[in-house]
Amino acid sequence: MAPPVQSRSRFRITLVASLVAALSLVWPGDARAKDGAPLPDYVVERFGTPPAIPDGPLPEGLQAAVQAAFVDSMENGTWGEAQTTALGEIVEAKDPRIVWMITDLMRFITQPQLNALLTAAASHLLGKDMPQVNSWGIVTDHLIAWDIPAPPDYLTVKRAIFTSVVPGWDRIFVEGDIDWRHVSWGGVLIDDRAYDTTDEPCNCIPAADNPAVSTADEATWLKDDDIVFGIEVNGEYRAYPRRIMEVREMVNDTLGGRHLGIPYCTLCGAAQAYFTDDLPDGVERPVLRTSGLLIRSNKVMYDVNTYSVFDTFRGDAVTGPLAEKNLKLKQATVVTTDWGRWKAAHPETTVLVEDLALGRDFDFRNTRDANGPIFPVGDVDPRLPVHEDVIGVITASGKPVAFQRSKAFVALMNGDEIAFENVRLKLDAGGIRAVDADGSDLGSHQAFWFAWSQFYPGTELWEG
């Protein structure tokens, strides 16, 4: 996501000495997730033992403190003695579930003093001293890894916090099949422009609808080693340069007579292509946009017509009218490769025009995102490094499987067959695609391991 914008909230801070002194108290818990199952050893080794978690509703007094500290402070744009007193009552209640609300507030705080106060409160409730640097991210990582349950009526409070900053999120924060604990702000505003108005500027990550394209010969601005995302539909080929996709992050296009929605999550190293036609009766084409939100470092996309939120990685509508219709978008394969090899293999390809980059030339993959996720993800499956590239696909039996790209590429170059159930891998223009045993497309794509494994927990991993 792009660099953070300034929150409109401004807080007045009054510290209460008795609260700060109380924050030295901690208590032990046990290494169990919210469902009672033991936490994996690698989680305990990295994050320690989680605190004890109470059950049931919040007492009335604690509900009032939550309202004062988290809702009133954002609605009024101030933090004063009443809020600090309420935070003290929250700490005394010893309910670690409330830390989810603390981190939601912390995400929008720019004042060091208030951030220190909230960090201290979170440290006390979790029984672990949290550092002041990147405290929001570190505390949130612990909450996710320990699977701390959300407090009762969590969405109501979270919605109040987030919509006080960006009113356009009021139709996003609704009940649905989504874990709102894991949703955070990506630092940008919502792109809520109507379909095919993307030539209009916005204070957002600007999607592109029906982008202009050129032939391969006309694309003299591209170097052979520039990374592109290649898509083929019904015998038509198109390249989406990473330089453009790092600016746009979302394209609504038509290729081979089919409508597509193409999100690119820079944080996950994943470009995906969803068919947005051939839908159930009564469902209009979803027009995909960037919400400005993240879920475990994956962009949260939504349909601007219905405000239905989608699981970007899986293609399921999880809120709104499209979720009520159980809509799941089918994927087309995206081949990640370089321009030289893509155009050599597919000389008839078209490619997005340079103007769509808006004069920018980002390379998040090799700069900002090079040393691991920059937003909270919690625990990561330790079978591969977090930023290892994998080719992910779903088998005919519904089983997710990931292939380590580096190993698979060498094996395919050596002429080896790579097969898992019905899935077969093959080289395509310097990239890799997954096909069925009969050669038909299976809708695969490349991504970082941390992203694939967290959205498909328990995924099979091809060992080579």
Image: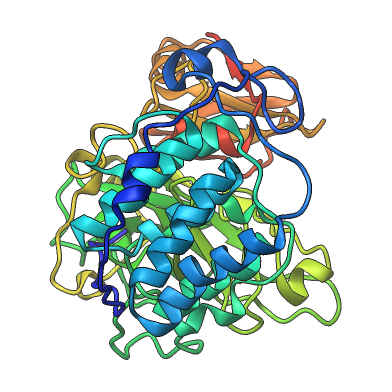
- How is the model colour-coded? rainbow
Q: Position of residue 152 (x, y in %)?
A: 71, 57
Question: Does residue 227 show up?
Answer: yes
Quadrant in which residue 423 is drawn? top right
User: Left or right of 362: which side holds 276?
Assistant: right
Q: Which residue appears farthest toward the front when viewing the image?
A: 18
User: Left or right of 195: which side holds 280?
Assistant: right
Quadrant in which residue 5 is drawn? bottom left
Q: Position of residue 24 (x, y in %)?
A: 37, 32
Quadrant location, the N terminus: bottom left
Q: Residue at x 27, y 35 (%)?
A: 131
Q: Position of residue 462 (x, y in %)?
A: 58, 15
Q: From the viewer's perspective, is residue 374 above or below residue 236?
A: above
Quadrant in which residue 396 is drawn? top right
Q: From the viewer's perspective, is residue 161 above or below residue 131?
A: below
Q: Residue at x 33, y 41 (%)?
A: 21
Identify which residue, 312 or 120, lies in the foreground.
Answer: 120
Q: From the viewer's perspective, is residue 168 above or below residue 389?
A: below
Identify which residue, 58 or 352, lies in the foreground.
Answer: 58
Q: Residue at x 49, y 34 (%)?
A: 126
Q: From the viewer's perspective, is residue 419 above or below residue 304?
A: above
Identify which residue, 143 or 166, lies in the foreground.
Answer: 143
Q: Residue at x 47, y 28 (%)?
A: 26
Numbered-mark total: 0
Q: Position of residue 342 (x, y in %)?
A: 34, 45
Question: Does residue 446 show up?
Answer: no
Identify which residue, 113 or 456, lies in the foreground.
Answer: 113
